Amino acid sequence: MFRNLFNRGPQPVEPAVDLDPALDDLDLRAARDKAFGGDWQAAWDVVEAAGSDWERRGRRVWTLSVAAADDGAWLDAWRAAIPDDPTAAAIWASTLAERASRARGSAPAADTTPERFVGFAELSAQAAVVGRQAIALAPDDPVPWVDVLWAMFAGGRGRQQEFAEALAEVRRRDRFHFAAHLAAVSFHCEKWFGSHDAMFGLARSTAAAAPPGAGVTMLPVFAQFEYAMREFNWGTPTPKGLLASRRYFQRPEVQRELDACVAKWRAAGTPAHADAMVCRNWLALAYALSDRRAEAKAAFDEIGPYVASPAWSYFFGDRKHGFLSNWRWANRLR
């Protein structure tokens, strides 16, 4: 309190938190707005502009699908005009996967109603069917395979081989596709269909094989979040769970892995891949849990207002609250 009272320097301005999944992709924001106005061609243009940058194509497809899950009239018009358009099919598959996720909700299985599970299963099955239709229309595109992967989260126990085969299809098209491997690490975590060992094994082997600068080099950090959430904060986050998570992140072996991941991720220069903002959010959260204020502030400075990961809610209950409370701490405002 007194430090802030007698500090004559300018105070940092709290960011106006931006939860838009488009993040800092301004072209995508503009195209989505036009699509809502009836110009679905703008959506086609922005996805195709990604070319063979499959991660950027995937993020744009997913962001447009989030919008279509709320109001899909523009996508319906597109699909009616060009029934066999592979981009429209990919967005439709992702829209069904998004609706499936919403039907399931984020609560633990014990707190999820049978009706929610039924909706999750039905919409996931539809997403898988449409995903494979999109694959048939554009066989070289790895993006629809990601929705095939997510569709297996409904009734995934016993589907490990099927999941591995679908992941192999992604890898044949894009060896280190970020969204696909994020889905794979999630599938293999203990809260879904795997174990801590399986989750860490996949995250670490993928990160070790990937080239410097690839987003998947940060997957072990995400795995650490999953571990700490499952062990210390399962269900509803509590102050006791948060304290235990902080102690866990401050262990020397966790710190060494964090530093190694960051070093490899930054080794190719300033990361510019499509999911770099997600990785920056992971960095800020990991540094905050590690009590590394200077590094957390630097990460927040890179992020700006963009809240790009649900992992904030693992420990703070709400993404916006978690982001802002840690931003204030990093900037010595609390």
Image (tube, rainbow, N blue to C red):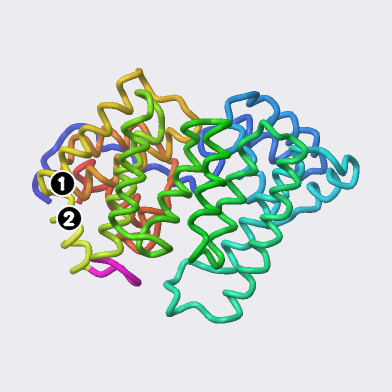
- Per the image, label 1 sits on a secondary structure element best described as loop
Image quarter for residue 271? Answer: top left
Q: Nearer the viewer, residue 213 or 174?
A: 174
- Ranked by sequence position, the earlier of labels 1 and 2 is 2
What secondary structure is found at the residue carrying circle 2? Answer: helix
Residue for badge 1 = 291
* 76 or 135, nearer to the observer: 135
Q: Residues within 10 Å of mark 1 (few under 14, many from 20)?
A: some
User: Closer to the observer: label 1 or label 2?
Assistant: 2
Kind of residue indicated by mark 2 = Arg
Q: Does the CB distance between marks 1 and 2 fall below 8 Å?
A: yes
Q: Position of residue 290 (x, y in %)?
A: 17, 47
Magenta portion: prevailing SS class: loop
Q: Which residues are magenta?
A: 232-238
* Distance from the alpha carbon under mark 1 to that under mark 2: 8 Å
In front: 83, or 283?
A: 83
Q: Residues within 10 Å of mark 2 (few under 14, many from 20)?
A: many
Q: Amino acid at mark 1?
A: Asp
Residue at the image position 32 percent from the left and 37 percent from the top: 300
Residue at the extreme top of the image, as rendered: 269
Residue 92 coordinates in the image, percent (x, y): 73, 49
Q: Residue at x 61, y 80 (%)?
A: 115
Q: Residue at x 89, y 47 (%)?
A: 80
Tell me if residue 153 comes above or below residue 331 in the rendering.
below
